[in-house]
Amino acid sequence: MGDRVSIQTFSAGETTTDIRSVAVIGLGYIGLPTAAILASQGLRVTGVDVNPATVEAVNDGRVPFVEPDLGIHVAGAVSQGTLRAQTDVPAADAFIVAVPTPFKGDKSADLAYVEQAARNIAPRLRPGNLVILESTSPPGTTRRMAEVILAERPDLGTEANGGTAAVLFAHCPERVLPGRIMIELVTNDRIIGGLTPEGATAAAALYSTFCQGGIHLTDATTAEMAKLVENAYRDVNIAFANELSMISESLDINVWNLIELANHHPRVNILQPGPGVGGHCIAVDPWFIVAADPERSRLIRTAREVNDSKPDYVVSAIESAAAGLEQPVIAALGLAFKANVDDTRESPAVDIVHRIATANPQAHIAVGSPFSGTGLPAKLAGLPNVALGTAEEALAEADVVALLVDHDAFREITPEQLAGKRVVDTRGFWRN
């Protein structure tokens, strides 16, 4: 299992796969789209999830979260009989692990979900099976997953099979953008790293059934690191924009106009600032690099600290805007971690609303969202001074307006709706 794989590009015509059945472990924002796209290619796919409500929804052809076009794929695959869901792991030719990899209090990765998935898979394995880790993970996690499985099933290891492992392992990190997952699953290039060359090739053959982008083969550790590097690169550049926004505020400069002017330079492309960085990737993955080499990851750590501190800055700005109002009504526009989705994982907007509401019990926080039908996230649901509705409802009663998420729907807000209100615009919608 220790062989390195030289970087190469895989062509779908180089090999075929004997894989006919796939079990996808974890039916979240990545697992369910992956299961649906594989099932749409005619493979027999079983989705596995610990949440019975998710299993019931999928078997009914429904999607338990908002993602454009996913519902069509799920409903079609279920009706064709190529996709089903259950709570226990079945036998299959290939297993794709797409479970959460959150970080602990010390910012190191919590691999408990991966290890539990490995233990659940182990009894179902047969010689010749392929096990793929798709969850974004620290370097070495794919090898750790293989070690857990082979500890449970030593009959599949190299010592029991003449020096060749009976099961292949690979890492295939997702590289998609929420809101465009079903498009980017097909069109984006894919990096695939194997613990052996055979593992990489077998995984590439499976993904080539739907991936129209380039498929680039390497070893598992490099593939793991590549995904982390992609998100750390984004994080560092966002941190520059966020830090610039705070400096500009202190100098009474419109940061969005400043960035627009600077970006006229042919070799400058500054990103847009915001209230922080959220989601399951950019807000988490750079910490995995820091944990892997704390002494040499100074820039990556600093960027994370800058972005993690930005909600503090926004909270202070909102509290300053509400100063002097005895029982202020604050319209908080948006809760998601990015525009035009309902995903609130690691969202700075949720953190900002929670902190304002708990520190100022006399204030009423009217959250306005285009996804108001999905309800408040658990962190906010029990707060008596937080209510969820539409943007129009929130604006109508607000003394202070805080734009936290750049949903397209908020672009329709008129100057008349903001007249006489104190505004904190973290997205530059009303920069002029």
Image (cartoon, rainbow, N blue to C red):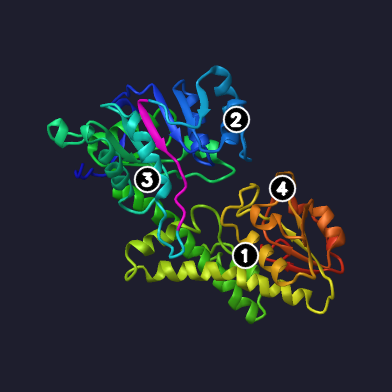
Q: Earlier in the sequence, mark 1 or mark 3?
A: 3
> Label 4 belongs to which residue?
375
Q: Position of residue 145 (x, y in %)?
A: 32, 44
Q: Which label is found at residue 115? A: 3
- Quarter in which the C terminus is drawn: bottom right
Rendered position, 270 above or below 210: below
Q: Is residue 337 left or right of residue 329?
A: left
User: Does the residue at mark 2 contact the one at mark 1 (Cβ under 8 Å)?
Assistant: no
- For numbered disc 3, what is the local secondary structure? helix
Q: Amino acid at mark 1?
A: Pro
> Label 1 belongs to which residue?
275
User: Does the residue at mark 4 contact the one at mark 2 (Cβ under 8 Å)?
Assistant: no
Q: Which label is found at residue 56? A: 2
- Who is closer to the viewer here, 100 or 66? 100
CA gap, disc 1 and disc 4: 22 Å
User: Does the residue at mark 1 contact the one at mark 3 (Cβ under 8 Å)?
Assistant: no
**Foreground disc of the pair 1, 4:** 4
**Foreground disc of the pair 4, 2:** 2
Q: Earlier in the sequence, mark 3 or mark 2?
A: 2
Is residue 140 visible in the rendered image? The answer is yes
- For numbered disc 2, what is the local secondary structure? helix
Q: Amino acid at mark 3?
A: Glu
CA gap, disc 4 and disc 2: 20 Å
Residue at far top of view: 80
User: Does the residue at mark 3 contact the one at mark 2 (Cβ under 8 Å)?
Assistant: no
Q: Amino acid at mark 2?
A: Glu
Q: Earlier in the sequence, mark 2 or mark 1?
A: 2
Q: Residue at x 48, y 34 (%)?
A: 34
Q: Which residues are magenta?
A: 92-103
